[in-house]
Image (spheres, grey):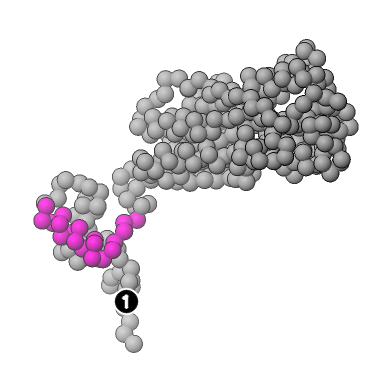
Amino acid sequence: MATRNSTTGPTPGRVTISTVADAAGVSIATVSRVMSGSAAVKPELAARVQQAVAELSYRPSRAARGLALGSLRNIGVLLPDLTNAYFFDLVSQMHRGASEHGYRILIADSAGDPEQELNTALDLLEQVDGLVLLSSRIATAGLKQLARRQAPVVLVNRVELGVDLPMVAVDNFTPMMQLCTHLSQLGHRRAVYLSGSELAWQNRERWRAIQSLSMFGLETSYVSCDGTVEGAYASVPEALSHDPSVLICFNDLSAIGAISALRDHGVRVPEDMSVTGFDDNVLARHIAPKLTTVTNPKVDLGQAAWGLMQLMLAGETPSDSPPMLTAEVILRESTAPPR
């Protein structure tokens, strides 16, 4: 059987830029210029290269091409929980914008751990042209460290004063106040808040809104949770020990877990206990009872996030972060006057 010395040419069956150059009878540099769209190549040479590329079905390495052009055409997106459907619409919208401009999205999960998130962010910045942090848990000092990096970083779903990063977020405070006002008007006087991660800016804003209404007669206890279905399910016995008439849940996933646990404890919703969520994910409209919640403009948020990233990729500095997006309370069947 004949053998081929690996130093004499490319591996059989593997088409490289050298293979194309040999087939077209031109230099590797000429092939590179043609593939990058350079006009500094004679038309007849460019035609020979294009013909060789077509005949050999050659596809250039994106990484190598990116290095040559000074751009990897990758955008990193770092989020705390890939299993949370809340992030799907947000990332999908950013992916749509990125694709239209020739970028790919690389997604990473930090599992909600601030140290892991910072280390992952630093690693990603070596592989991407820009990085989007969704609902970041990184300490303020870490965010300031990322702000000093050359590649642009955009902060989404978090507002931090004194951090030199472009930010875009949804107003969590106002709709949570409106939701609690509705509960107070229904006659509720004792509530339990099933929290999200205490590291989440959204959780801090929602709890701040709830506390601000204590003067209007809605006494609320705080029960630590994690914003997941299972976490909320496990927290319901502690919540019931406070004898509430309503559970205010950090998000819709928490509300779904809470309703399931209440059912298993023989507590009817909303006859015996009202339950609210936040985000208005698709399940909120299809569980029984349908969930009173707050819309979260995820598509608009994704568009705003990509808009900031696009500006920075173009070398521009956003003059001001966009104003916080508005959210709206949606009243459904899971809330009613207390017994």
- Which x, y percent locates residue 315? 35, 30
Q: What residue is rendered at 63% in x and 19% in y?
A: 174
Compared across the picture, whether 335 is left or right of 105 comes to right
Find residue 208 and report its horizontal and vertical position in percent: 70, 21
Q: Is residue 99 magenta?
A: no
Based on the picture, tell me whether residue 50 belongs to the magenta stretch: yes
Q: Residues within 10 Å of mark 1 (few under 14, many from 20)?
A: few
Magenta residues (range): 43-61
**109 with respect to 3 (left or right):** right
Q: Which residue is mark 1?
A: 5
Q: Name the dominant secondary structure of the magenta segment.
A: helix
- Residue drawn at x 87%, y 28% is 242
**The quadrant where residue 213 appears:** top right
Image coords of residue 167 (percent x, y): 51, 26
Which secondary structure, mark 1? loop
Is residue 34 shown above or below 57? above
- Up the image or down, 4 lies above or below 117; here it is below
Residue 172 percent location from the top left of the image:
62, 24
* Side of 194 where 173 appears, left or right: left
Identified by mark 1, the residue type is Asn
Which residue is pictured at 35% across the width and 32% down the height?
314
